[in-house]
Image: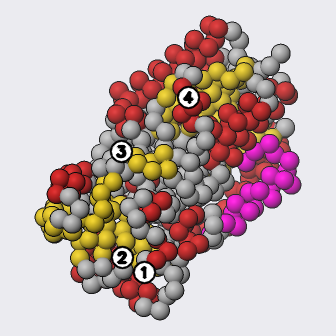
Amino acid sequence: MSLRIAVGGFMHESHSFAPRPTRYSDFLRSGGFPPLVRGQALFDGVRGTSVPIAGAVEVGEARGAKLVPLAWAFASPAGPVEDEAFERIAALICAELSAALDAGPLDGIYLDLHGAGVAVSFPDMEGELLRRVRAIAGNVPLTISLDPHCNLTQAMVDLVDVLVPFRTYPHIDMRAAGAQAMELLFARIARGTAWARAFRQIDFFLPLTTQCTMVPPMLPVMDERAALAERSQAAEIGFCFGFPYADFADCGPAFAVYADSQEQADVTADAFLSYINAREASFLLNVIPAEAAVREAMELAKTATKPVVIADTQDNPGGGGHGDTTGLLAEFIRQGAEGVAMALINDAESADACHRAGIGARVPLMLGGKSDDSPLQLTATVLKLTNGKFIRTGPMAEGNPADLGPTALVEVAPGIRVIVCSRKMQPHDRSVFRHVGIEPSDCRILAVKSSVHFRADYQPIASAVIVAAAPGPVVADSSVLPFRHLRKGIRLRPMDNRSFPG
């Protein structure tokens, strides 16, 4: 008789200081990922996409399990999730779970979670969701996949049988993490008992731009994680880098080790913690101001045979930015840069004005700056108009549908083109440029509102990558934010002797 396994998910990365809260409607129109889906429609909604649950479903079906769909939801990172949104989506998942149990016993549950969700009334959003799931399902084996930007909590570790964060940032192994979490669910069901577990928190923040697993300092840490897991025979070392913009006690990096014995779990956890602590200095911040970034890019572009890529890290929509700040764009204009293509400025009002004016029109705009009241007043030439719909093609989001709403490609100064959209999305890959007729490899300078994810598809065509700090809410140095609720002793920068007073 085949195993009966319920599957669902709820994904959000919450920035406590972002300019806009996350509403229920944001989960219905999620930009570059599938929208909220429930029941049998879940399978068609996620199949063929890059999201973790797609990998889990593939493994479950290949193993011959009877998969029971719950609900799955994703919204782009922004401010804390409003209570209405959390309660409605949590209720959907729990109602479908209750109905599944009415229809017969479940052998297991898999959930696709982010781990950095903050709801207004529940700072540990995933912990609260898992508490509700456990209250309904009892001791049914439960595994989850997580984004490594999870702010891992003791409650999350206690409430699940095993958790599997992605190994990569950029996140090119989302499906693989979902698949592994499902494989471990089968293993947990087969063994009949839970693994021993050890939970450790690291006492300093890791700046977002230093977390990229493609390069040091994070690359050797992830190599050691893999080697240690093999040496210790741990079922999993779930390392979460933390999302250093969530104002609650458990914000910060942490990990959980799952093993056959408590001694094995503790010894492995202590060894990994020591390894990370010894490399603290390597995680010091590595960004430069926008003025210097543009100057360097222009100089490099004079002789480069491939594009220079600049990341506008502090307005990263993937970190909670609104995707509409104009500091970097203003610097391009001020310095007279040429051969620039920029993605994206999220400004529905300006995109609508371009669509009403038509291709070839000269349109006066108050471009961007809706989230920080700093728009750029300029006149733009409309080069191309689209409905903002395309299929993403890069390593991280291949197969995912994108829907930017009405979108325009405009020239805002000689040699400076900008994609203006109606719905925020991180420009993970080159498809966002190609859908407006720009071949990225032909550009001298590419500017993207991203911190790290862009590297998966842009770094291979780049002559150089520059991470720039222009004004925006996803501050590279999160220690400047007005935190109030962190745990006592956490340090907001590597190698900083100051700690949060608690």
> Would you say residue 226 sits in the magenta stretch?
yes
Q: Look at the numbered discs 1 and 3 and tell me whether their residues touch, using CB distance below 8 Å.
A: no
Identify the secondary structure beneath mark 1. loop
Pointer 3 residue: 79
Q: Look at the numbered discs 3 and 2 and tell me whether their residues touch, using CB distance below 8 Å.
A: no
> Would you say residue 230 sits in the magenta stretch?
yes
* Tag shown at residue 42: 4
Amino acid type of the residue that numbered disc 1 sits on in the rendered structure: Arg
Q: Residues within 10 Å of mark 3 (few under 14, many from 20)?
A: many
Identify the secondary structure beneath mark 4. helix
Residue 254 horizontal/vertical position (percent): 61, 49
Q: Residue at x 83, y 24 (%)?
A: 192
Q: Is residue 334 above or below residue 146?
A: below
Q: Is residue 344 above or below residue 247?
A: below
Identify the secondary structure beneath mark 3. loop
Q: Look at the numbered discs 2 and 1 and tell me whether their residues touch, using CB distance below 8 Å.
A: yes
Q: CA distance from mark 4 to mark 3?
A: 26 Å
Main SS, magenta residues: helix
Q: Is residue 180 above or below residue 463?
A: above
Residue furthest to the bottom = 303
Image depth: mark 3 or mark 2 in front: 2
| Front one among 244 and 489 | 244
Pointer 2 residue: 340
Q: CA distance from mark 2 to mark 4?
A: 40 Å
Pointer 1 residue: 444
Tell me if residue 18 can be seen: no
Amino acid type of the residue that numbered disc 2 sits on in the rendered structure: Val
Please give the range of residues in magenta: 217-237
Q: Residue at x 37, y 71 (%)?
A: 341
Image depth: mark 4 or mark 3 in front: 4
- Which numbered disc, 4 or 3, marks the residue that appears first in the sequence? 4
Q: CA distance from mark 1 to mark 3?
A: 34 Å
